[in-house]
Amino acid sequence: MNIYFDNNATTKVDSEVLEEMLPYYSKFYGNPSSVHDFGRKARFAVNKARSQVAKLLGIQPEELIFTSGGTESNNLAIKGYLFANPKAGRHIITSEIEHHAVLNPCKELKKQGYDLTVVSINKEGVVNPEEIRKAIRGDTALISIMYANNEVGSIQPISEIGNIAKEHNICFHVDAVQAVGKISFKTKEIKADLLSLSGHKINGPKGTGVLYIRKGIKVKSLQQGGHHERNIRPGTENVPGIVGLGKACEIAKKTLNEEVIYVSNLRNKLYLGIRERISDIKLNGCLEGILPNTLNISFAYIEGESLLLKLNKKGINCSTGSACTSGSLKASHVLRAMKVPSHMIQGSIRFSLGKYNKEEEIEYTLKILPGIVQQLREMSPLYEGIKEDGI
Ligand code: PLP
């Protein structure tokens, strides 16, 4: 078995997506800016993709620009908005559990003299909208909150936050990278002014993304170059990537509802099975308030990295959290913000499922996992001590 449980890190490209992309490398390889037939074909394909993305997000095609992914979309949203609207103020509000693609641009802006308020979250990994309201000042220019967290899957009360932003006439950016394709929503209903999406999280190609920019919102380009993407994102378009992203959005729109049911059934089976078979575990987040595909569990008395490696040897591929921080052995900023005790943070594993997972993979995992956890616990001096004390 070779089981992939790391879909929040990235996903397999859907075969229909790949099929749609390939001719744009080999046959229709024109530059969309060219006036000849090759260019026209490429331009047509980019426009078609624009409509496919717009339909999924419930926006107008002219309200989005293509980028290289979630990181670029977030940077462009945050810095691009502030630089284009200097009179809006120099204060930013964000949360503790944002992805580094939001936290780091905000920290960079702070070094440049902007003011930053990072609101805390509760034990379930959820922002309290009233904390956002309290943080608002006369010079607040931007609120940036993620729709759903990548590590624990906690879904944020995004419409409520959107309403607060609207009441105060403050621009609202939503990092929806983990929500798109997993939660059904309309961008207008959540009152987002700016919204980021990434292709590789929705069975599309890596290096593709979108920034939704609501009509009337000004964003300044972070690069200087040609006149592509309404002068906001210069550079020759990644036509095959954009075509793939468009197709991935079309598929997501069509299959979202049934996929959510399928994936959440598998995820629940995995969770209940783990709970039945293994003691001293903690679900990080609450099952009703997390993404349908995500399960972040702390196993007491063990090292998450050791568990990961042992699972990997048995063909089960999951992660200890964010793909960007795993490998660095730094304790997850998300679990720390959720006040998970540090010994439990160490033993945390994220299973993030996707549409290609099968029931037999869950059964296999439930057969393998308890033995590995027990084996690692037997090696832990802390666990031995607790056993001897009879606690
Ligand atoms: N935002 C969130 C919530 C993410 O999970 C990720 C990727 O893990 C990103 C942003 C960055 O997206 P990309 O990998 O497309 O740059």
Image (spheres, grey):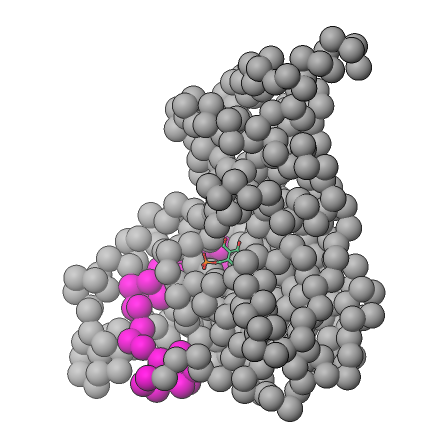
Q: Residue furthest bottom?
A: 87
Residue 100 in view (yes/no): yes
Residue 153 in view (yes/no): no
Corner quadrant of residue 77? bottom right
Given residues 341 and 166, the one toward you in this image is: 341
Going by the image, does 320 lie left or right of 33?
right
Magenta-drawn stretch contains 246: yes
Q: In this rendering, is residue 147 above or below 29?
A: above
Quarter of the image containing the N terminus? top left
Given residues 22 and 378, the one toward you in this image is: 378
Q: Main secondary structure of the magenta part?
A: helix
Q: Position of residue 304 (x, y in %)?
A: 56, 31
Going by the image, does 99 lie left or right of 20?
right
Q: Residue at x 68, y 37 (%)?
A: 342
Q: In this rendering, is residue 340 above or below 155?
A: above
Corner quadrant of residue 261? top right
Magenta-drawn stretch contains 54: no
Corner quadrant of residue 51? bottom left
Q: Residue at x 44, y 48 (%)?
A: 10
Residues drawn in magenta: 225-253
Going by the image, does 245 lie left or right of 95?
left
Number of numbered markers: 0
Given residues 225 and 19, the one toward you in this image is: 225
Quarter of the image containing the C terminus? top right
Q: Position of residue 43 (x, y in %)?
A: 29, 77
Going by the image, does 356 lie left or right of 126?
left
Q: Residue at x 52, y 40 (%)?
A: 329
Q: Position of residue 3 (x, y in %)?
A: 43, 31
